[in-house]
Image (spheres, coloured by chain):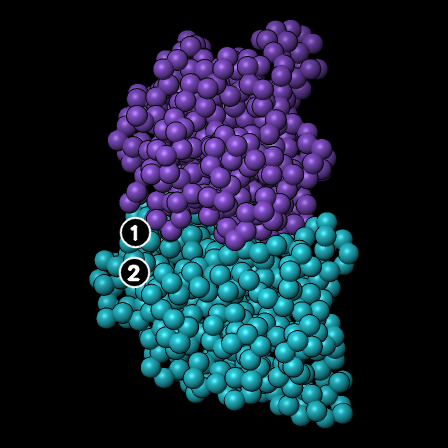
Chain colours: A cyan, B purple
Amino acid sequence: MLRDVYIVGCGMTRFGRSEGDLIDILEQASLAALDDSGLDPKAIQSVIVANMGAGILSHMTGVASALVDRLSLYPATAEVVENGPASGGSAAKMAACAVGSGLVDVALVAGGEKMRDVTGWESTDFVASLSHPQAEYIYGVTLPSLAGMFTRLYMEKYGVTHKHLAMVAIKNHSNAMKNPYAHIHQTVTMEGILTRPEAIVNNPPVAEPLRMFDCCPVSDGGAALVLCSEEVARKSGKPLVKIAGIGQATDTHAVHERKDPTELTAVRLAAQQALKMAGRKPADVNVAELHDAFTILEIAESEEVGFFKKGTGHLALERGETSLTGKIPINPSGGLKAKGHPVGATGVAQLSELTWQLRGEAGERQVKDARVGFSCNFGGFGNNVVAFVLSREK
Amino acid sequence: MLRDVYIVGCGMTRFGRSEGDLIDILEQASLAALDDSGLDPKAIQSVIVANMGAGILSHMTGVASALVDRLSLYPATAEVVENGPASGGSAAKMAACAVGSGLVDVALVAGGEKMRDVTGWESTDFVASLSHPQAEYIYGVTLPSLAGMFTRLYMEKYGVTHKHLAMVAIKNHSNAMKNPYAHIHQTVTMEGILTRPEAIVNNPPVAEPLRMFDCCPVSDGGAALVLCSEEVARKSGKPLVKIAGIGQATDTHAVHERKDPTELTAVRLAAQQALKMAGRKPADVNVAELHDAFTILEIAESEEVGFFKKGTGHLALERGETSLTGKIPINPSGGLKAKGHPVGATGVAQLSELTWQLRGEAGERQVKDARVGFSCNFGGFGNNVVAFVLSREK
């Protein structure tokens, strides 16, 4: 990147069920981020919206123009970026390029999704619209089904058990209790979701071996960031959080075409790129937000990113290394699992959480001495992954 | 822009009715652009798809990941950019930022739309999904209806007549006869579409005063560009076409909120910005591709861009100044009117046409000595406009 890009503002809506429509959600998150930045809204030259489903879910296009209008930011430029559940990461990357290229000095990234207007299977079918149309979708493949098959292979190959999956849920639900923006504020226990006989009723199978508490909820929600040049960031007086590294990689669209479907190659490549650009190693990362749409993914990603050796993520989890006070706290926000996963918002929300962590503004869920943060935003079933390294600067 | 960006490859599908699906269309255009660039496909680091309607029209998301897969370009990054009918301009801008920021050296921009899978009113309703949901869409506003009202006002204020509108159609249909990629290969005459009594049958009203031949057709189609750094462009050996200027501006989402609805403020601002960045004046432009989704728009945009004084575009048209051999040839490709308007492809196709013109490769429709080209890609009803200035370099 020819010039550095900083995050000077971030904001979120409470994830969950929103009374408003998609534009209301994006507006609320944007106003929070603008307010947090302390900048005059007139400084915004570019608005980039991350959204996956406005067309299918709300019969809307041109959502970014609608947001600029709602915020009275014209003549600021506006566009929507879509990359499935990694739309947020992609939008933030593109905004970083707009600032990094010198075309603009200040950009607003707003991610949002209004998913709960449709019910049950329709949400799942909507998300499945990202699967391969001929090789997956027409056979009824859904994201939970892909994750279920992935989990089965992972269990066989590495000895991951239902108990390890539940540990991810328990940890992330516990973190979410400390996050006022999280969708689910509910402490769960190993007994309640797994070991008591009646747990099968409260935590029924979704796509075996995955059970309900292994899957993220369906959420409405929005998150926003204000990105800017170093000059604007220094003038703003806000704590300096830099986008130190960006990485992104694609993999085969259809999961069954991968040589070894338990390898998440795109996660590995995206993480390597982001860390290389930042001049960091996995061990330098103090806090990470990983894309735990399913509990197994947090374990697998923690390995592909390089925090733990392949096949040992569940053991590190068992030892508590990924808890809030562990060696490398993962998903202090509660993750997608408990904070929620309004798909277009997720990548942006990950960066908001890291920004709060690096500023020391994360309240009860603050990771001690966090200076370097890492995020992994996972699109498709690992076919398009965006990673960031953020660093606190002086 | 901190470093210059060049166009080294361009390609299109023939617009019209495509047998293939959206991915087939994008693939075909991309392969043509890659082939034209002469670069090894492995050089592509970023794929940006311009598309407006995959969600609504094809129940698809993650189209860019699907295209990367089809072209076997992984691990190249991939995302979709949506900005209504200006999606193509926005995608090209974002790809330019990716190269201009130094994040990547080579990017593929592929715009495409598969619009003819739905019939009649459904196409119009799909495009209307970009109108203001509460202030326009629910009242049945469509793009032709907005254009009809705009035309009525323009006629009253500036003395534009049905004859002037027909002149745009006649000119652009004539140009399209020389463009192998154009949807409509049909010469039309003033008698045939306007002055003979039976013309009302062949050219019926759509949204008065606009008649059928004042409106672009509904087309499937794709267009693609390969963008790169100066270093890559010089090594490629291709004629050097530089993205010299980029401009973009938004306006109120609802047209009725504009002080004077006959002013296309976003066109004016976007053009000013693009020309300023390029260090050019309107009079320096040798060839222009304007967004004539309706004939009136070519006239109005030719004024807002600064080729002619406000209210005099129709007089310049009458004098033949915008014909292929005129002072400032407009829409040598045939424009949206006759080349067709697969919405996501249009902004990309405009830049392809300009590239061919600046290289001297436009065949029978070649504008003599074209060194500076200008494009205007018009989103919404003028609520989000993207403009480019391209220049031939040595």
Secondary structure beneath dot 2 equals loop
Q: Is residue A279 left or right of residue A188?
A: left
Residue displayed at 58% across by 23% down: B181
* Viewer-proximal residue among B290 and A2: A2
Compared to B317, does A206 lie above or below? Answer: below
- The disc labelled 2 sits on which kind of residue? Leu
Which image quadrant for residue B227?
A: top left
Q: CA distance from mark 2 to mark 1?
A: 24 Å
* Viewer-proximal residue among A317 and A52: A317
Compared to A107, does B205 lie above or below? Answer: above
Where's the C terminus of chain B, which quadrant? top left
Q: Chain of mark 1?
A: A
- The disc labelled 1 sits on which kind of residue? Leu
| Residue A376 tag number | none
Residue displayed at 23% across by 58% down: A231
Is label 2 on the same chain as label 1? yes
* Viewer-proximal residue among A304 and A143: A304
| Residue A224 rendering spot, x and y as whole percentages | 43, 62
| Residue B263 rendering spot, x and y as whole percentages | 40, 32
Q: Chain of mark 2?
A: A
Q: Residues within 10 Å of mark 1 (few under 14, many from 20)?
A: some
Residue displayed at 62% across by 90% down: A189
| Residue B201 rendering spot, x and y as whole percentages | 70, 15
Of callouts 2 and 1, the N-terminal one = 1
Residue displayed at 35% across by 64% down: A278
Dot 1 corresponds to which residue?
A2
Compared to B78, does B214 lie above or below? Answer: above
Q: Is residue B360 left or right of residue A384?
A: left
Q: How many marks?
A: 2
Q: Residues within 10 Å of mark 2 (few under 14, many from 20)?
A: some
| Residue A39 tag number | 2
Where's the N terminus of chain B, which quadrant? top left
